[in-house]
Structure formats: C-alpha cells, structure tokens
Image: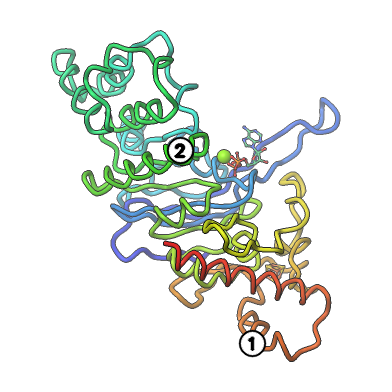
Amino acid sequence: MMLLKTTSEPLLRVEGLSKNFNVAGSWPWQRRKLSAVNDISFEIAAGETLSLVGESGCGKSTAGRMLVGLSTPSTGRIQFEGQDIGGMSAAERRAVRRRIQLIFQDPYGSLNPRMTVGELIAEPALLHGLVDRGGARDRVAELLNLVGLGDRHAGRYPHEFSGGQRQRIGIARALAVEPQLIVCDEPVSALDVSVQAQIVNLLQSLQDRLGLSYLFISHGLSVVRHISNRVAVMYLGNIVEIGPKTAIFDRPLHPYTRALLAAAPVARPGARRAGTPLTGDMPSPLAPPAGCRFHPRCPLAVERCKREVPVLSHAEGGRLVACHRWQEIPAFQANASAAQHSPATKRLLALYRDAATRSNSHTNAV
Ligand SMILES: Nc1ncnc2c1ncn2[C@@H]1O[C@H](COP(=O)(O)OP(=O)(O)OP(=O)(O)O)[C@@H](O)[C@H]1O
Ligand code: SF4
Ligand SMILES: [Mg+2]
C-alpha cells in the first residue's frame, strides 16, 4: 500500500480503508457483497484541502461517511493526529468525532424545521459542553456573523431561508463544535452558480481564518480546481491517481483522470469542447472487474490489465498513479502523428489531445 505523504505531519491519515455493503441478491434469502470503497489511503494536512472526484457511485460519500463515523469501515485504519480512531474508547472517539464534521449537499434535510436557527446552531455546542445556556446566545451570534449572516436571523426557521443561506446555517452548525476537519460532501452542487461561488469563497475564508482542513467531495471539476491543494481521483471504489492539483489538472496521467477531464464542460465561452467523453457505464460494484477495475472502459488496456491489480506508484509531479502503462503515455502522445495506431489507440490519443487543450484553456481562463 502506497501513501502519498503530505509535506507536514498529517492531521488525518487513512490507510487501506474499505467498505463492503451486504445487499439483497435476486432472491430474498440471497446476500451479495457490494464493494463501495476498496483499499484507499490518503493523508490530509492541517489547513489543507484534498478533493475527492469521480463518477456517481464511485464511493466518495461512503469514504466521507466513514471519516465522520456515520459508517463503520470493513477494513483499514483512520488516524487523527496520529491516534488510531479504531483503538479508542467510546469517550475518546466522541471527542475526536467532534473535531471531524460533515457538511451536506442539502442542509435542509438535516435541519429540524421546528427549531429556530439559533437553537439549531446552539444545539451541538450545548451537547458537547462547549457553551452553557447563558453563553449560547453570544456564541450563536458570533457563528452567524462568521458565516455572513446576522444575529437577527437567530429567531427564524429554516424554511425562511434561501438555499445558499441554509448552507451557511449548515456551516455555522458544523463550526459550532470547533472542528479541525470538515468533510464537504457536494456542498454547492444544489446551488445556483453565483451562490456556489459565494459559498466556496466562504469556505476558503473560514479555512484561512480558522486553519480548517477540508475533504471536498464534488462532481464540479472547476470548483475542485479552484479550492483544492491536492486531488484524489476515484474509480469504482479505488483511488487511481492522487497528487497536487496542478499535476492532476495540467498533466493527468491515469487514463481515467484524462477521460474525466476530457468529459468536463468547457469553462471559457468559445473554447473548444472536449470531443471524446468517457464511454460506457461504470461496472457494478457488486461484480467489480478483475485486475484493473477500469480495464473494460480503458482504450489502453492489455491482457495484463485484466489479471493484475495496478498498485499506486510514484510518478512525476509528486503524484501517485495506479496504472500498468502510465509510463508509456508520453510516448503515445509524442508519436501520435507518425505512428499507425489501432482505432482504440487513436481514440485514446484524441482524448488526450482534447484533455490537454482543455487544460490549457483552463490555465488561460483562471
Ligand atoms: N447503505 C448502503 N447500502 C448499500 N449500498 C450502498 C450504501 N451506501 C452506498 N452504497 C453503494 O455504494 C456505492 C458507492 O456509493 P456512494 O454514495 O459512496 O457514491 P458517490 O461516489 O458518493 O456517488 P454520488 O456522486 O452519486 O453521490 C454505490 O454503488 C452505492 O449504491
Ligand atoms: S492498468 Fe491497464 S486498464 Fe487500467 S488504466 Fe492502466 S492501461 Fe488502463
Ligand atoms: Mg455522494
């Protein structure tokens, strides 16, 4: 198992984390194993943002839920400040869990409609004994100001707020227990683009002011490009590439990362749209392909890929990549014009060229 070390001592270290669900089969008495997260490892430093990207169903939320204690890992270890959470007493675990909070896509679903915003924000702080009833009012006012709302909002109910304001309330509620790490699971996906930018800017300014770390889960690659320090790309439960944002976006190495970037919408009006999106559906996590889980969709796949699981190994730009053939990709690019390639390779080359064009247009636009 290969771990990409952060430059400073990590706040969080995840090693070999897997989650299997036992789901119903074709018949009521049958049970089947669903491999949602498969042996993932990563670290997050204090004050850092690591983004988790990948197609729907690849296991991003399941990974995030294990970090905040909403789901129990099937195997693997989660260490917070060097302490293994699995080996802790219930009281110790509760204390650590307070410091790892979750922000949802839809905070409305998690806000009790019968409680005022003030009560909702005070509740977790009171539960953890961080304030007493006398101090709760001031703390709520402080938190509301911190997230760009005012203490006048404390007496209102969640339905009286817009989507962006509700997300601010969700953030204030998470901040109430003084976390160090926040798992942001698609925090802006349900919002209008202009409101998305406001919430992303708020998250960044809170990070600067409070030294927070984020695990930022998102489908939106432009948001990820904006907010991340490092990016982890997930495919069918596995991390296939992880590294600094610039390495991943400017020169993606894994065929899946390249396809993902090629399929993303072009941000700059008038820029050329990537023409070769990822084809086919992601296979079912009930029966993940043997060898490299990406091989049925990978134009570069060879026999070895069907048998042998690629492990993460060090590659240029300070990243890790899990592919048997990533070293050959620059040669594929260099020989693109001269060589007679198979249709599959031609498809791949077109895809890489489009990804590179997109990267350049992004670089110019940002
Ligand atoms: N409680 C559960 N029971 C059974 N299967 C589950 C459960 N939770 C998630 N899964 C399955 O695990 C896989 C990963 O789901 P997960 O929600 O983590 O994906 P995701 O990457 O967050 O997707 P999305 O981008 O759509 O939110 C999916 O196949 C999903 O159906
Ligand atoms: S290991 Fe093989 S199938 Fe998997 S991404 Fe690399 S080339 Fe494609
Ligand atoms: Mg999800």
Residue 304 screen position, x and y as percent:
76, 73
- 84 is higher (above) or lower (below) than 268: above
- 248 is higher (above) or lower (below) than 61: below
Residue shown at the point (18%, 24%) measured from the top left: 139
Residue 289 screen position, x and y as percent:
76, 56
Looking at the image, do the residues carrying marks 2 and 1 touch, with CB atoms under 8 Å apart? no
- 273 is higher (above) or lower (below) than 123: below
Residue shown at the point (20%, 23%) measured from the top left: 141
Query: Quick check: 100 left or right of 30?
Result: left
Amino acid type at image mark 2: Pro
Res 182 → quadrant = top left
Label 2 crowd (10 A; few <14 / some 14-19 / many >=20): many
Decide which of 138, 87 is in the foreground and name it. Answer: 138
Label 1 crowd (10 A; few <14 / some 14-19 / many >=20): few
In the picture, which quadrant includes the C terminus? bottom left
Ligand 1 occupies quarter:
top right
Res 125 → quadrant = top left
Q: Is mark 2 within 8 Å of ligand 3?
A: no
Q: Name the residue under label 2.
A: 187
Decide which of 309, 226 is in the foreground and name it. Answer: 226
Residue shown at the point (51%, 76%) measured from the top left: 315
Residue farthest along the bottom direction in this orientation: 338
Residue 184 screen position, x and y as percent:
43, 41
Is disc 2 placed on a helix, strand or loop?
A: loop
- 295 is higher (above) or lower (below) than 235: below
- How far apart in space, not on screen, are marks 2 and 1 (Cα)? 40 Å
Q: Name the residue under label 1.
A: 334
Query: Quick check: 316 left or right of 141?
Result: right
Q: Which of marks 2 and 1 is nearer the N terminus?
A: 2
